Image: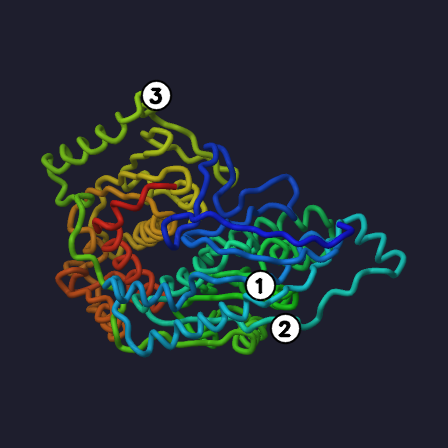
Amino acid sequence: MKHTRTTLLAWPSRRLPAAVPHRRRPSLHSAPRTIRTTRRFNSSLTVESNSGARNVEHTIFSTPSSNTSNHQPSPTRIRTTTPMREYRKLVETGVLRGDEHQTRIVQKLEDLHDRLMDYNPPAIPVTTQSSSLLSRLFGREQQLPSSPPENAPKGLYLYGDVGTGKTMLMDLFYKTLPPSITRKRRVHFHAFMIDVHKRVHAAKAAMGDGGDPILPVARDLANEAYILCFDEFQVTDIADAMILRRLLESLINFGVVSVVTSNRHPDDLYKNGIQRSSFVPAIELLNSRLDVTNLDSGTDYRRIPRALSNVYFHPLTPENNCEINKIWSSLTSADPSDPPIRNRVLHTWGRKIIIPESTSRIAKFRFDELCGQPLSAADYIEVTRQFDTIFLLNVPKMGMHDKDKARRFITFIDACYESKTKLFVTSEVPLFKVFSDEDTAGAKPPSDQMRVVMDDLGLSDEIVGRSSIFTGEEEVFAFARAVSRLIQMGSKEWAETAGRH
């Protein structure tokens, strides 16, 4: 573009479910939802559009002359919504229980929101493989930033136990970003790392031996979004730890601003992990470039929905089987052009997943078919991306010898929750007690840490059982989160809004 022009833009009102980015349904054989690949690794991600912005916002800005397509102008905006305004609405309508501690957290989000309104991220050099090679040969390689831009705002790192409202606050921030900020992304951290590993693999293949794949991956991510919101940030794998050390540094130096939620303080990430000393620089970076904020205040901010919809059935009786079969028949007969078929094949990561019975939008599995097989998180993400309603039958009570199945079930629940999938279940015992193991030798009463988590969530022994098959620190967090999410996914509110991919 060789000249400057002044443009008046008005965005229409949109109403999408808060905290769930709008997604267009791809075909059955498409890539996982977090990856959306094309043939070129450096354009393998479609940046998610603004989700949930309800107000019209008028923006006047001048488009600067530039030959770099990723340059984001700094517009003068008339704002109609902010994190604090939306938070106060939620408190006033009784959706949330506000207090001074949480209000201070929201004020931090408000301050970051204000700084981002005037933040003009630096242009990021776009270098192809061939031009990069020629630049190195002739000594004209473009200098990449070695430190963050001076005008880049500090990000936020929100940590606390399950039920402290981390995800809600992050989504509140994300949805109030104006539509004019298009380079933004909200993603569950596990899904993000699946995407990163795929990009790194593609970059290695494109660069050949001796190339550094992290820098081009970071450059592409920064080109696509200069505001990144990570939910459930955790590091338990050495491969993730080694990639994150350099990836985070590169993203920050490219001017990317992050809002992160986690169960842990940065100092406790990857604790006792292999070669943890190599990950320490990443911890120092998080502590220095993000405002680390503890959400724990002793108050349960999440109002657990008490009224459950008719989606969970126990015990495994002929009457309950008949009831859930009626629901299946009712939903699958709604569209005569899309009848259920058997053994549909879903392709994911070079493997085949057999869907025992499904329409194009609704799937049915037995527990052993979904959690008794060696499926990964990526597999469950792909299943929940494809089907917005899932029936899971014959969930057993799991003991100490079933921990692998239990972990897969938890991973599946997380995938359903993140994708807003509607879930119907038949189980041997109440669904919240499938992880309890009162009668199995080796089970232990809830630890002090588990008791704290249960208190935060308002969960009693009657709900989760008097003992659990999970004892490790990471397992406790995953177990508590799964119980919390199952309760929320069984609520009438969830039934009314879920299942709309």
- Residue sitting at 31 percent across and 45 percent down? 498
Query: What residue is pinned by disc 1?
Result: 76
Q: Quick check: marks 1 and 3 in contact, CB under 8 Å? A: no
Query: What residue is pinned by disc 2?
Result: 151
- Mark 2, residues whose alpha carbon is within 10 Å: few (<14), some, or many (≥20)? few
Viewer-proximal residue among 241 and 484:
484
Q: CA distance from mark 2 to mark 1?
A: 17 Å
Q: CA distance from mark 2 to mark 3?
A: 56 Å
Q: Exactly how many numbered labels are in the figure?
A: 3
Say if 450 sits above or below 62 in the image. Answer: below
**Quarter-of-image position of residue 322:** top left
Q: Quick check: marks 2 and 1 in contact, CB under 8 Å? A: no
* Percent position of residue 104, x then y: 38, 77
* Percent position of residue 24, x then y: 46, 39
Q: Earlier in the sequence, mark 1 or mark 3?
A: 1
Say if 322 sits above or below 124 in the image. Answer: above
* Percent position of residue 467, x then y: 19, 64
Q: Earlier in the sequence, mark 2 or mark 3?
A: 2
Task: Tell me the kind of residue under disc 1.
Answer: Thr
Task: Tell me the kind of residue under disc 2.
Answer: Asn
Side (left or right) of 226 relative to 216: left
Q: What element does badge 2 sit on?
A: loop
Q: Residue furthest right?
A: 138
Task: Tell me the kind of residue under disc 3.
Answer: Ser
**Quarter-of-image position of residue 302:** bottom left
Query: What residue is pinned by disc 3?
Result: 337
Say if 410 sits above or below 395 in the image. Answer: below
